[in-house]
Image (spheres, rainbow, N blue to C red):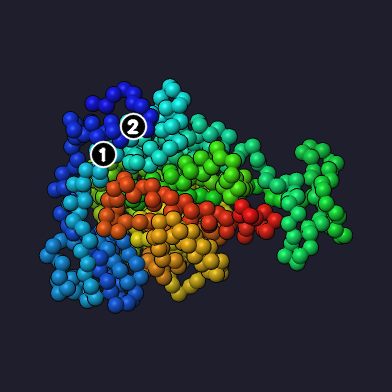
Amino acid sequence: MLRPFVLALSATSVLAQSQQTQQLPFNSPQTNPTASKTLVQLEFASTDHAQLVFDKLQEEGHDIWARKSTQITLPLEESFLTSSALSLELAQQPTSIKPLSSIEDLLAEPTVATDYSRQYSHSLLQNITHPDSSIRRAALLGDEIHQSFHPYDEGLVPILQALADEFPTYAQLVSVGNSSEGRPVWGLKITNSSHPHPHKKGDDSGEEDEDGDEDEEEEVILKKGKGKAKKGKGKKKKGKKGKKEGYKKKLGFVVSGTQHSREWIAGSTTLFAAQRLLLSTLEEETPLESRLINVFEFLFVPVVNVDGYVYTWENDRLWRKNRQDVGEGCFGVDLNRQWGYKFSPGNRPNPCSDAYPGTKPFEAPELQGLVSYMQNKTNNVVGFVDLHSFGQMLMFPWSYSCKQTTSDDEDLFEAAVGAAKALRSVHGRSFEVGSVCQVSLTSPGESLDWTYGVAKITWSFAFELRGGVYGFLLPPSQILPSGEETLEALYSLADFVGKKEIGKKFRLTSS
């Protein structure tokens, strides 16, 4: 049994000792029909062929794990692992069939089993709630929290609360709605609350404008509640009058993860980004991070699909949807088919399908709170990143069709390419860049289409994180590298967005 309290930074050794004497039972693979299958990657001759197969598989209720322009990855019975058998089933001839891994073998891996992360998280929680501040801070501010995945109420939420308590000037735990089973959807809001109006007194850096002239506009700041104006530094440019405060509101930027409950790496990567951004406030030489945390108000929501996530810990590790009752003995809607732009229930909706979109948009309570937050003008949301797994892609709208492009395609592509380059510089991983329909096939009702098309959040992006032969069953050892590379991409995107939204005068680079 675990001791009541353990020394900070020793959770791994305690867990190893515990596993020698006690191993909590993991759900038998026989209870999950997917567990006995092989994860297979199918390659097709063209995007059109892949799209036809993708649509057919979805209509028939197959569990698709990943998709790219000419690839589909899914679990298959051994009897289908031949070209002739698949051709009969799919009505299209795959150009290659590549078995990746046995799902049963992946589930049997000790560190992949839910027990490992549950016990580690329990040990860690005792550290971050320890009365000794040195133990508490060492566990919370180091890499310990990224050595395992975390259950929701008994791990992830207490960690978010501990970060908010540790950084009261910068972090606040907020609820962005409730699930169909009544659980709060928690997020961590991060900004420099002592710096509410960045640069309202002007930029005295002496930086030149695009035309080579110094900015000579007089800065006038109205004191709250008074009619007099206080002049700032600089020469007055003829014809310019009135106040200038830089901008009245911070820029809202939402980073969400785990719309699909089995994509644990998305939630852990979101947590990593939030923690590392807060850690940057403890360092002196972090000019980029300092500008970001002053200019932006970030909202990190590690798990949107909280009920489904809890279900993956307690019942079925590979559950995808939420857990609301949809009738006919079926449960759950696919949250990332539920968004209200070009929503479609499909030709033959099967409520038991893993990709069941529901009968109308935003039936899922989990999305209603997040949508309300982004539509609230007070939050001034200008950026949105939706983290998923897997496939190593960095995408922007549209998802519903390739027949249309956005009016911001050039800027979105430039931002995404820069982010992919920043990501690749960390561990050498290459991410494909493009609109969702270009690199990941088409599907209606996705988050990016709604945030861009309805909420008018120009800077809307989605990541498909690393997965490879593990698929959704990444071992905890992949959390740190996934977090490190994704964080650099997020910084790059925020930097790009800041420059576009605020202008050169408020550049976010460290130069």
Q: What kind of residue is marked 2?
A: Ser
Q: Residue at x 67, y 58 (%)?
A: 503
Q: Secondary structure at mark 1?
A: helix
Residue 496 horizontal/vertical position (percent): 57, 59
Residue 11 or 258: which is nearer the viewer? 11
> Left or right: 298 with respect to 392?
right
Residue 195 or 398: which is nearer the viewer? 195
Residue 236 horizontal/vertical position (percent): 86, 55
Residue 454 at least partly seen: no
Residue 10's disc number: 2
Q: Residue at x 74, y 62 (%)?
A: 209
Total numbered badges shown on the rendered structure: 2
For the residues marked 1 and 2, what is the alpha-carbon distance in whole angstroms? Answer: 15 Å
Residue 77's disc number: none
Residue 463 horizontal/vertical position (percent): 42, 57
Q: What kind of residue is marked 1?
A: Tyr
User: Residue 306: which quarter of the image?
Assistant: top left
Q: Where is the C terminus found, in terms of image quarters? A: bottom right
Mark nearer the N terminus (1 vs 2): 2
How many other residues sit within 10 Å of disc 1, few (<14), some (14-19) or many (≥20)? many
Q: Where is the N terminus found, in terms of image quarters? A: top left
Q: Is residue 243 above or below residue 215?
A: above
Residue under pointer 1: 116
> Left or right: 211 with respect to 357?
right
> Residue most toward the front?
285
Q: Is residue 121 above or below residue 104?
A: above
Q: Residue at x 53, y 69 (%)?
A: 409
* Pointer 1 with pointer 2, Cβ within 8 A: no
Residue 38 horizontal/vertical position (percent): 18, 59
User: Residue 399: which quarter of the image?
Assistant: bottom left
Q: Is residue 413 above or below residue 384?
A: below
